[in-house]
Image: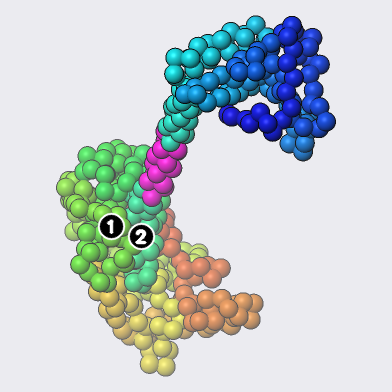
């Protein structure tokens, strides 16, 4: 820092500075004033510069300065606020600076170098912190991005695809995934990092719990989920969202097929057994399962899961038909099975149809925007909810146990 002497007043104290005098120095006539520690007019050495009060410095300033000569020119260097220096320390510092000036060395250059070095170090430290922050942010974003493509998300995409295609298996897949996959330790792992060994461990747990058939179905749905994602890049019918999972292999396909749990039974009922079953079914209480079970049998042995999907729109009493829709497999449209309603089947269907139509009409009045308003009214329902095939299976098991207890037949495979 260099000041022009002519721009301010100066005062020399031949007896030199003392702590008391330093404390009393102040500006004269409201302008910057210099006081010198007994120096000569040529080279004054240590001094104090006092500045008047201003908005930035309400009390004014009082700063130690050192004056010397370098290359024939007067050089003035500021040491800083007098409150940060003792008089003895300021004099020692002034002596060293004047010695450097006499040797032709400019202390200000070294000061600038130290300042630049300090600023560079500070900038490097800030850059390091910012880099670490960016890395942490990037890692967090990567983790959030990876969380979008975990095994659970893949399964959810597959279920959504099934439901959008109108596949009845969507509900079954959702239930199995929710019960056995989403609760596993692999649910939150990126889908592309899940291995066949991981899925084998998951399936083994289901089998050891005594649910071999469930394990086989879970494997089948997992295999289909991965296969759908593998097709995404080259199959326009597959949702584009599945491409983001970057699936390169199907780990479920490499697991054991669990074929022994998929084996269909070849045990059939004899005529005598069938007669006993039908007799007990007709004599059973009028539950939500009774009519669909009777129709399953009387319509020629229909699958319960397919029959319970029938809506009132699928029943044509005038034509005497009921239409079943088979949506299994890869077909985009369900295969229609139109069955005749004659005799007892017509009577059962008519009674149920009329009752469900009345209930649907009331439902439309209660909720004009509900499912009933769009014709989606299941024929077999409890409180407007489609009967679950498991409900029918439970009713059959009750009859089976009763038949065994009564010693009608030992239907151990029924």
Quadrant housing residue 325: bottom left
In this picture, is 49 found above or below 231?
Answer: above
Q: Which mark is residue 225?
A: 1
Q: Secondary structure at mark 2?
A: helix
Q: Residue at x 42, y 41 (%)?
A: 134
Membership of 133 in magenta stretch: yes
Percent position (x, y) of residue 201? 27, 38
Which residue: 81% across, 27% down?
Answer: 28
Magenta: main secondary structure equals: helix
Mark 2–mark 1 distance (CA, rounded to whole Å): 8 Å
Work out which quarter of the rendered image holds the N terminus and state it.
top right
Secondary structure under the numbered disc 1 in the rendered image: helix
Quadrant holding the C terminus:
bottom left
Residue under pointer 2: 157
Residue 184, image x and y in percent?
37, 41
Is residue 119 a member of the stretch shown in magenta? no
Residue 259 is situated, as x and y percent measured from the top left of the image, at 17, 51
> Residue 102 at x, y = what percent?
48, 14
Towards the viewer: 162 or 146:
146
Residue 128 visible in the displayed image: yes
- Numbered tag placed on residue 35 in the rendering: none
- Closer to the chain start, of discs 2 and 1, is 2
Which of the two residues, 209 or 111, is positioned nearer the viewer here?
111
Are dots 2 and 1 in contact, CB under 8 Å? yes
44 relative to 313 in the view: left or right = right
- Picture layout, residue 279 above or below residue 176: below
Tell me the magenta residue range.
Answer: 128-145
């Amino acid at each position: 820092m260099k000041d022009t002497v002519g721009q301010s007043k100066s005062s020399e104290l031949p007896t030199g500075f003392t702590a008391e005098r330093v404390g009393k120095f102040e500006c004269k006539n409201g302008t910057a004033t210099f006081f010198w520690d007994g120096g000569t007019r040529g080279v004054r050495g240590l001094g104090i510069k006092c500045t008047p009060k201003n908005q930035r410095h309400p009390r004014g300033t009082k700063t130690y300065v050192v004056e010397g000569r370098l290359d024939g020119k007067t050089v003035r260097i500021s040491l800083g606020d007098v409150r940060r220096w003792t008089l003895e320390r300021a004099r020692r510092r002034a002596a060293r600076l004047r010695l450097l000036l006499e040797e032709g060395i400019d202390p200000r250059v070294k000061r600038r170098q130290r300042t630049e070095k300090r600023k560079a170090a500070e900038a490097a430290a800030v850059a390091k912190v910012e880099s670490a922050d960016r890395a942490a942010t990037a890692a967090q974003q990567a983790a959030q991005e990876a969380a979008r493509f975990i095994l659970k998300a893949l399964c959810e995409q597959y279920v959504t695809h099934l439901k959008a295609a109108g596949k009845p298996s969507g509900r079954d897949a959702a239930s199995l995934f929710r019960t056995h996959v989403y609760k596993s330790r692999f649910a939150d792992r990126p889908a592309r990092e899940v291995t066949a060994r991981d899925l084998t461990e998951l399936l083994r747990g289901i089998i050891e719990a005594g649910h071999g058939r469930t394990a086989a179905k879970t494997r089948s749905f997992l295999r289909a989920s991965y296969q759908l994602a593998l097709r995404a890049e080259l199959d326009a019918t597959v949702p584009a969202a599945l491409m983001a999972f970057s699936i390169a292999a199907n780990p479920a396909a490499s697991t054991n097929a669990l074929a022994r749990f998929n084996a269909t039974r070849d045990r059939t009922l004899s005529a005598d057994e069938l007669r006993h079953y039908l007799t007990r079914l007709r004599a059973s209480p009028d539950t939500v399962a009774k009519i669909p079970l009777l129709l399953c049998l009387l319509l020629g042995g229909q699958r319960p899961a397919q029959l319970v999907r029938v809506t009132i729109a699928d029943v044509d009493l005038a034509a005497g038909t009921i239409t079943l829709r088979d949506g299994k497999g890869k077909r985009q449209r369900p295969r229609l099975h139109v069955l005749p309603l004659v005799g007892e089947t017509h009577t059962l269907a008519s009674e149920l149809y009329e009752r469900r139509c009345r209930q649907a009409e009331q439902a439309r009045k209660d909720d004009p925007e509900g499912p009933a308003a769009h014709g989606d009214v299941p024929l077999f329902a409890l409180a407007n909810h489609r009967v679950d095939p498991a409900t029918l299976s439970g009713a059959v098991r009750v009859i089976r146990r009763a038949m065994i207890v009564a010693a009608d037949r030992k239907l151990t495979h029924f």
